[in-house]
Amino acid sequence: MEKLKIPYPVIVEGKYDRLRLLAVMEGQILTTDGFGIFKKQEKLALFRALAEKTPIVVLTDPDGAGKLIRAHIGSALPKERIIPLYVPQTKGVEKRKQAPSAEGFLGVEGQETALLYDLLKPLASDTTRAENPLSKLNFFEDGLTGTANCTARRAALAARFSLPTDMTPNALLAALRVVATFEEYKAAVAALDVK
């Protein structure tokens, strides 16, 4: 089965959900770190910045915790920018766990590959967004990695796009691919006053 190319960022709860989706799709997958979304304002700031440029897919577990996380994201982002996806409430235990969750439902990580594939497939046919060619090589060539002042340069660049200034290089790269065109990125880098 060929992986689906999903043009929108997908928000899931945790790293195991993210790994599960990577089995069926290519694209940007962000995590809320579970209830960490309630404490980490920089995560919500990133989600808001992304939502200004593109719709965002929200896929949380089908339990009470997933509903709370989904509602929190929904209260922070414009409703028309959210693409809500849901997995069924299936009783079971994830392979890596000894016991079922409090409510006994499988989370995103416990879903069958075919189910996740079918769930995401309609989004893969949306080709309205062009692929941004921005890469790690561009970051290196532009002094955003591999130099003594690269952290300060990344922070300044992130601020120009209203993104959190403490993002990792990979997180910043993924966000910039969504919020900026390649030309906007190059113009912003050229205008940086951090050498």
Image (tube, grey):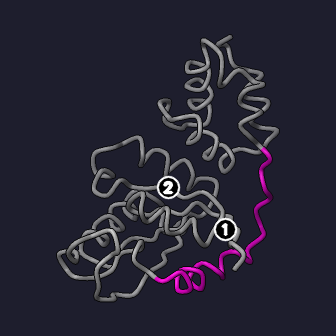
At 33% from the left and 87% from the top, the residue drawn is 89
Q: Amino acid at mark 1?
A: Ile
Q: Amino acid at mark 2?
A: Leu
Looking at the image, tell me whether mark 2 or mark 1 is earlier in sequence order.
1
Q: Residue furthest left?
A: 102
At 59% from the left and 53% from the top, the residue drawn is 52
Q: Work out whether 33 lies above or below 171.
A: below
In percent of width and height, residue 140 lies at 72, 27
Q: Which mark is residue 6?
A: 1
Q: As drawn, is 145 to the left or to the right of 43? A: right
Q: Which residues are magenta?
A: 112-133
Dot 2 and dot 1 residues touching (CB under 8 Å):
no
Q: Which mark is residue 30?
A: 2
At 72% from the left and 28% from the top, the residue drawn is 188
Q: Work out whether 93 lies above or below 28.
A: below
In percent of width and height, residue 183 lies at 82, 38
Magenta region includes residue 169: no
Q: Quadrant of residue 147?
A: top right
Q: Work out whether 184 lies above or below 31.
A: above
> Dot 1 surroundings within 10 Å: few (below 14), some, or many (20 or more)?
many
